Amino acid sequence: MKTARFFLMIGVALSLILSACGPTATPTAVVTEPPATEPPATDVPGFTCAEPIKVGLITDASGALAIYGQMILRSFMLGMEYATGAPGTAGDVFDFTTVQENTFMLGDCQIIVYVADDQSTPDTTATIAREMIEVKGVDILVGTVSSGATATLQGIAAENQIPLIVAPAAANDITGVNFNEYTFRVSRNNYQDAMNLCAYLPTQYSTFVQIAPDYAFGRGSAAAFRDSCTLNGGTFVADDIFAPADTTDFTPYMEQVKASGAESWIVTWAGGGFIAMMQAAADQGVNETMFLGSTFIDNALMPIFFPNAVGSTSGILYHYTAPDNPVNGWLVFETEARYGLPPDLFDADGMNAAIMLVEAIKATNGDVTGSALVAAMEGMTFEGPKGTVYIRPEDHVAIQDMYILTLTNVTDPEFKFYEYVSTNRPEPPCLLPEALKDRCGTLPYGSLGGQ
């Protein structure tokens, strides 16, 4: 059973994540027997393209979610190096200071990556995306951190018939109600988070209640947890509790949580309101009678905010110690060598985006028209840091490994905090809008049948 202090720490952690808190520890080397420091040789010697291929990477480098954007920036460039077989060369800063150029060679074909900071602001995302397309002439877009900004990016990409590879935004709607044929994701969706955690939670707790913000993200996540945990044997003993996203007084909601009598309460929330929620939970004694189901977060914040969680078991989308494959070994070694710390929560997403991009270019023999790239990416399979990633052709969801780990400590200077428990490979339902339901084929539609 977690203490009130632990619950409050989780709230503070999430608040600081959203305010782009940076790491506070400097780790030591983590790889004792490193892989070859050169990326693997490509299998496309002499590969050519009529003109340079241009890629627009849009992420958060200085805004509210910069802690995540920094992971994407470094891992995408490492992924490009891995997939093309050699490091890139950095270019000049362009006509506005948020855009920089990096060039990679795939055989004799030049791939130019423009990098831009959208600060997780949809209006800025839109401005940058249009400049990328209209001024730089990009053929492919990659990004971004914020799910709301990603929705904006989706529309612009579709209008211009340019493929968008989504990393690391997680909202179900991206490949659900907002789906278009040009949107592909390498990041997991919230349903996969729920399925991963619910593979464990109902083995320890039988009854559940949950609270979520009263808008599309919260309702979608709540539906996913209800469906997934029910399918795995759990029982929700009360209706899902929804509070306005700007709630500051959670007392009446925590009274409902406590009155449910559930063994575990599940929270979907983001932002400063989480702190007020956890304080209300402590004040109402929720912490003394219920277990909070919470996924593990990034390496830097685990030691600060999870010291009282040692011994708990939960889900995580990626931790560098969990996968055992050559691609992850290369990513771990190179990230350590160049940045002085191991890969973090979203580094696998950034590398996967780069690998997928290069594999698509190879598959089309350099044809970067939207129709050619869409055809190549639908149903694509490639090897990344999390092992085999499969891009489901029906809805462009990325089927990938996720992990259940037990927290053993929060003091290891190499961020080796966990004991491995198991690997899951969640197959979420198809969440396309009714008008596109036929695309789902034989996939479960709308739910897993557990509600």
Image (spheres, rainbow, N blue to C red):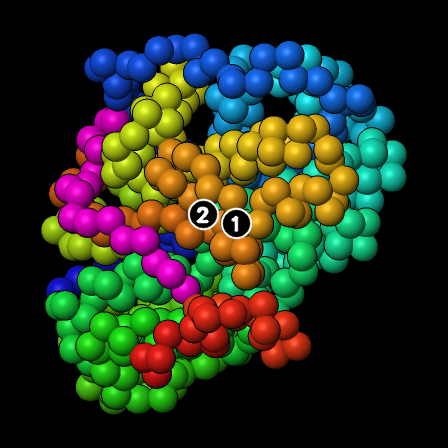
Q: Position of residue 153 (x, y in %)?
A: 70, 52
Residue 421 in the magenta stretch? The answer is yes
Q: Are marks 1 and 2 in contact (CB under 8 Å)?
A: yes
Compared to 277, does 153 lie above or below? above
> In front: mark 1 or mark 2?
1
User: Label 2: which residue?
Assistant: 390
Q: Residue at x 82, y 40 (%)?
A: 133
Image quarter of the N terminus: bottom left
User: Label 1: which residue?
Assistant: 379
Q: Residue at x 81, y 55 (%)?
A: 159
Q: Position of residue 112 (x, y in %)?
A: 71, 23
Q: Is residue 79 left or right of residue 284?
A: right
Q: Looking at the image, can residue 119 be seen?
A: no
Q: Amino acid type of disc 1?
A: Gly
Q: Position of residue 14 (x, y in %)?
A: 41, 54
Q: Amino acid type of disc 2?
A: Tyr
Out of 434 and 372, give the one closest to the viewer: 372
Compared to 297, does 329 lie above or below? above
Out of 66 and 170, give the one closest to the viewer: 170
Q: Looking at the image, can residue 200 be seen?
A: yes
Span of residues in magenta: 412-428
